[in-house]
Image (tube, rainbow, N blue to C red):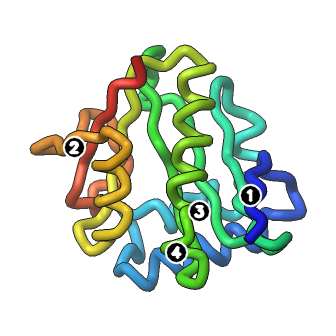
């Protein structure tokens, strides 16, 4: 299978929005306090183009959009970023797409000079949590101050150095 990871462009916005919302619903991430409800989901290319030191990447498997993930500054910190909205279609899971996309995002974060990367997720996303642990993320006992997603129940942090 051919996997390409590319920066988001406007023509990917509708598909990425649909993926984020459908996968969010699959895992119960519906409504206020969950990433799929953020306004940015409707126009990811515009949102990430307007933010310094941030990027959103789209995973193309055999030329088809199967998911995406991004990096953005966390709550005004200069050395802390957040792994954001990493969602994959069910058919693309288990093929290394999540790992490749996560590693691409983390490499971008390092290039931008971030020292640490935060993420929040749901305990129902067991495959994702296992991957994050393999990538070196460690569990936190509570969300970091400034998190926007109070519906999440798993918080993790990784050193990028």
The tag earlier along the polypeptide, 4 or 1, is: 1
The numbered disc on residue 97 is 3
| Whether label 1 touches label 2, CB < 8 Å | no
| Whether label 4 touches label 1, CB < 8 Å | no
Residues at marks 3 and 1, CA–CA distance in whole angstroms = 23 Å
Residues at marks 3 and 4, CA–CA distance in whole angstroms = 7 Å
Residues at marks 4 and 2, CA–CA distance in whole angstroms = 27 Å
Question: In the figure, 151 relative to 19: above or below?
Answer: above
The numbered disc on residue 83 is none
Disc 1 packing (10 Å; few <14; some 14–19; many ≥20)? some
Q: Secondary structure at mark 1?
A: helix
- Which residue is the site of mark 4? 93
* Residue positioned most to the right: 11
- Which residue is the site of mark 1? 43
Q: Position of residue 79 (x, y in %)?
A: 44, 16
Residue sitting at 14 percent across and 44 percent down? 142
Q: Secondary structure at mark 3?
A: helix
Q: Secondary structure at mark 2?
A: loop
| Whether label 3 touches label 2, CB < 8 Å | no
The tag earlier along the polypeptide, 3 or 1, is: 1
| Whether label 3 touches label 4, CB < 8 Å | yes
Residues at marks 4 and 1, CA–CA distance in whole angstroms = 24 Å
């Amino acid at each position: 299978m051919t996997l390409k990871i590319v920066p988001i462009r406007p023509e990917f916005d509708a598909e990425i929005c649909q993926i984020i919302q459908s996968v969010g619903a699959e895992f119960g991430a519906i409504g206020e306090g969950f990433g799929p409800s953020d306004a940015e989901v409707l126009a990811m290319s515009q949102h990430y183009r307007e933010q310094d030191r941030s990027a959103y990447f789209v995973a193309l498997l055999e030329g088809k959009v199967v998911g995406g993930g991004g990096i953005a500054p966390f709550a005004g910190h200069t050395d802390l970023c957040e792994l954001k909205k990493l969602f994959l279609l069910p058919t693309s899971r288990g093929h290394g797409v999540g790992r490749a996309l996560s590693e691409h995002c983390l490499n971008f974060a390092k290039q931008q000079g971030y020292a640490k990367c935060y993420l929040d997720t749901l305990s129902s996303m067991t495959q994702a949590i296992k991957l994050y642990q393999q990538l070196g993320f460690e569990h936190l006992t509570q969300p970091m101050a400034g998190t926007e997603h109070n519906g999440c129940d798993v918080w993790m942090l990784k050193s990028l150095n």
